[in-house]
Amino acid sequence: MQTALTERLGCRYPIVQTAMGWVADPVLVAATANAGGFGFLAGAVMTLEEVEQGIKQIKSLTDKPFGVNFHMYVPHAEQIIDLCIEHQVRAVSYSRSPSSAAVKRLKDAGVVCMPTVGALKHAVKAVEFGADIVVVQGGEGGGHTGSVATSILLKQVRKAVNVPVVAAGGFSEGADLVSALALGASGIAMGTRFLLTQESPVPEATKAIYLQTPPEKIITSTKLDGLPQRMILNPLLSRLEKASSLQMLLLAVKNGLAFTKLTGVSLFGMLKSAMAMQKNTDLTLGQTMMAANAPMMIQEAMVKGHPNDGILPSGQVAGVITELPTVAELIERIIREADQTFDNLNALRSPN
Ligand SMILES: Cc1cc2nc3c(=O)[nH]c(=O)nc-3n(C[C@H](O)[C@H](O)[C@H](O)COP(=O)(O)O)c2cc1C
């Protein structure tokens, strides 16, 4: 199956495994590449050393191309760009665009720039900054997300930009791939579906909660860090959702206290940095403290395996996923189903 995406990325199938903090590790990325898809390492939550180690580990597990995700606002962003160029990583993904100069540096070195956007205006801006491909993530998608559904956003963006568009948010099976291609996408990108595979490092207890949760219980909330984020409505998020400003502050302090034991940062230190952060936002102090705790709250569920005490970012699609295939089984199945869907659609055409 050849599309502009497979041509640019050098992969067999137009299926992308997106970056997910603490989930898209070297093993998952390499498994995706070996199965014919294209995976992104979750470099946005890694130190520079971890990114370099991750790239080396992927290269030891596969000779296929892969990508690295990073945030432009981390202090070592420029060094991650250097690493990607040095190691000839095929593509980078990001949500806030690096400067035009940084994008040019990547492109001159042959690295494909492939941002994820959640709104039409961000897609247009990303292309102005030099993006080679844009991934549009609709509101169904997991983690930070926009408010426009994938089907609508795709139609908006494909008309507005002159680069290949990849659709993300809500996909899990072969018919999804066919429908996205029919709507003009060059491929699909999936997060949650890859999170729920054998190779994903997420602890079994946490995966079990994803498999049990219906779509209605996977909501968008701004309570974690002030930005709309789609997550499973578990006991912790339910408490956050109902909390008043004062309760939010108390919860943040309580969480902060638990995490100070783990990180060695004093509660006073945490309050001080929260107050400094709060100056530039509309958030309450409680919300700002909560935002500062967000990475640790996510790790509590996604790394330590305590799904009721942490946060579970998830696409709504988890509500229709029932099992944990290997990555190879998943990709082969999607391609088989897509072929079958093409045949079924063809059979609908009248012979005349
Ligand atoms: C657990 C989880 C963690 C995520 N972490 C990141 C991240 O670190 N960087 C990023 O750009 N997107 C992140 N996302 C968004 C995904 O990369 C992807 O765009 C989204 O999951 C697509 O929607 P889907 O889950 O319906 O497939 C995350 C999503 C999930 C579910």
Image (cartoon, helix red, strand yellow):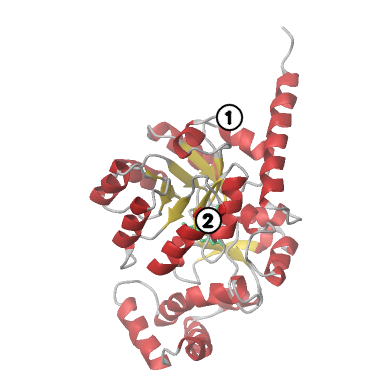
Q: Nearer the viewer, residue 274 or 185?
A: 185
The circle drawn on residue 182 is 1
**SS under mark 1:** helix
Tell me the quadrant of the picture where the C terminus can be found.
Answer: top right
Q: Quadrant of residue 340?
A: top right
Where residue 209 sits in the image (x, y, percent)?
A: 71, 67
Q: Which residue is mark 2?
A: 60
Amino acid found under the numbered disc labelled 2: Ser
Task: Answer with the quarter of the image where residue 23 lies.
Answer: bottom right
The residue nearer to you, when weighing 1 against 251, is 1
Q: Is residue 26 above or below residue 170?
A: below
The relative height of residue 53 versus residue 181 in the rendered view (above or below) is below
Q: Is residue 273 above or below residue 172?
A: below
Residue reaching furthest left?
A: 101
Q: Nearer the viewer, residue 316 or 30?
A: 30
**In percent of the image, x 43 and y 77: which residue is there?**
292
Residue at the outermost top position: 352
Q: Is the CB–ligand 1 distance for label 1 below 8 Å? A: no
Percent across and percent down for residue 240 are 56, 76
Tell us which disc is closer to us: 2 or 1: 2
